[in-house]
Amino acid sequence: ELLPANAYGVLRRAGTELPLSSPLLNEHRAGTFACAGCAAPLFAAAAKYESGTGWPSFTAALPGAVDLKPDASIIFMPRVEVRCRRCQGHLGHVFPDGPPPTGQRFCMNGAALAFEPLEG
């Protein structure tokens, strides 16, 4: 009851927000992207890039911030789910088609994230 409906649907029910619907898609300031459910730091803003998918995307998560789980919910498209390590909220999925240096695309739902700008 503390989360907005869209964040609850993503974090607690493993939903997916509509592409291009997150204000965080166009967030380019220095800072940290945190879990909207428990405020755990998840991604450095420096790891964010424009993937062209319509969802905020990152090349890497902060060390120890996320858990990766096999996701076979779509039978013809096995994926790897990304969850917040602290609260186990669903964040999105990671794919092996990202840019260097990792080659990974952490495709996240903006509703599952909160942005904390760098002070200064």
Image (cartoon, helix red, strand yellow):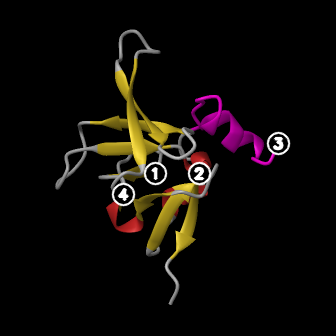
**Residue 34 in the image, given as x and y percentages of width and height:** 53, 58
Q: Tag 2, which secondary structure?
A: loop
Read off the magenta span: 1-18
Q: CA distance from mark 2 to mark 4?
A: 21 Å
Magenta part mainly helix, strand or loop?
loop
**Residue 19 in the image, given as x and y percentages of width and height:** 53, 40
In the displayed structure, 105 sits above or below 100; it is above
From the image, state whether disc 2 or disc 3 is nearer to you.
3
Amino acid type at circle 4 is Leu
Tell which circle, 2 or 3, labels the residue nearer the N-terminal end: 3
Residue of label 3: 1
**Quarter holding residue 93:** top left
Residue at the spot x=36%, y=53% of the render? 61
Amino acid type at circle 1 is Pro
Q: CA distance from mark 2 to mark 3?
A: 21 Å
Residue of label 4: 62
* Neighbourhood count class around disc 1 (C-alpha, 10 Å): few under 14, some 14–19, many 20 upward: many
Task: Please indicate whether residue 22 sits to the left or right of residue 103 in the image.
Answer: right
Residue of label 1: 56
Report if the CB atoms under discs 1 and 4 are less than 8 Å apart.
no
